[in-house]
Amino acid sequence: MAPHPQQPQPSLLNRLTTLDKHLSLTLYTLTSSILPHSLLKLLEFLGDGRLFFPLILSTLAISSQLLPIYPFLVNLLIGSVLDLILIGSIKHIVQRPRPVYNKNMSLVFDVDHWSFPSGHSSRVCFIAGLVCLSDVGIVYLVYDFEMLKIGVCVWAGVTSISRVLLGRHYVFDVVVGACLGVFEAVAVICFLNYEKLASVWADGLSKKYKFWTTAKVWVLFGKNNWRMPDYALLYAK
């Protein structure tokens, strides 16, 4: 009797995916009869981009640029746009289906059909990271800024976990989404900061203005064969 051919061992990625699905289903099953569904839906609503984008834009529209919190609001908008681009692109590339037990979910874009990574997790963790890294501005609005940091981080963590308990995502989707959110916060603070961008923009305009002013002075004195005064030469330098 010929021996049965040995079946190939599943790859590491397949084993991790199976473990991820099993863990996610276990958490969903254990908590579905314990946690109130309305609470999980509330967390989903509070972390929805359809709430945050209009809220950020309307707040910016009625805020003065002189307010201490204005740079934070602009950074929040910049990071939200960055988050939308990153999450949408990754979902479109990976196209991991959502859990089969995901029910009653409102889909806005085509990429919302895909599960990896979690957009809610990246969004709330970005907001939490930005709050923790942006002391100036928010500190004027709250009495205890440290408690605000703790509260926002707890909200981000609970919202991220709720994505698994609600059946919207697998555990790995949430973990990667949270890491992306923190990365976005660091990127905004270090590279896309409103105050830094505004400073670069203002410096560029100043150099252009100085160049054209100097050029006009040279043309004026050159046409009339005048000697440029010393103060004009100093300005041209």
Image (cartoon, rainbow, N blue to C red):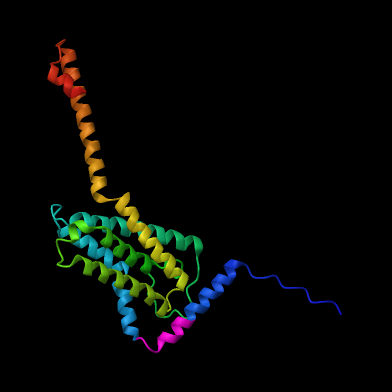
**Residue drawn where x is 27% and y is 62% of the image:** 132
Q: Is residue 65 left or right of residue 49?
A: left
x 43%, y 78%: residue = 167
Q: Residue furthest right?
A: 1
- State the image quarter where residue 153 is shown: bottom left
Quadrant of the image containing the N terminus: bottom right
Q: Where is the C terminus found, in terms of image quarters?
A: top left
Q: Position of residue 155 (x, y in %)?
A: 30, 72
Q: Could you tell me if residue 161 is visible in this image?
A: yes
Q: Position of residue 43 (x, y in %)?
A: 31, 76
The residue stretch that appears in magenta = 26-35
Residue 109 seen from this side = no
Q: Nearer the viewer, residue 8 or 56?
A: 8
Residue 122 coordinates in the image, percent (x, y): 37, 65
Identify the residue at horizontal 43%, vertical 68% (top origin).
175
Height in image: 39 above or below 198? Answer: below
Task: Pick the residue in front: 74 or 14.
Answer: 14
Q: Main secondary structure of the magenta part?
A: helix
Q: Would you say 237 lies left or right of 170 here?
A: left
In the rendered structure, does residue 61 fall within the stretch colored magenta? no
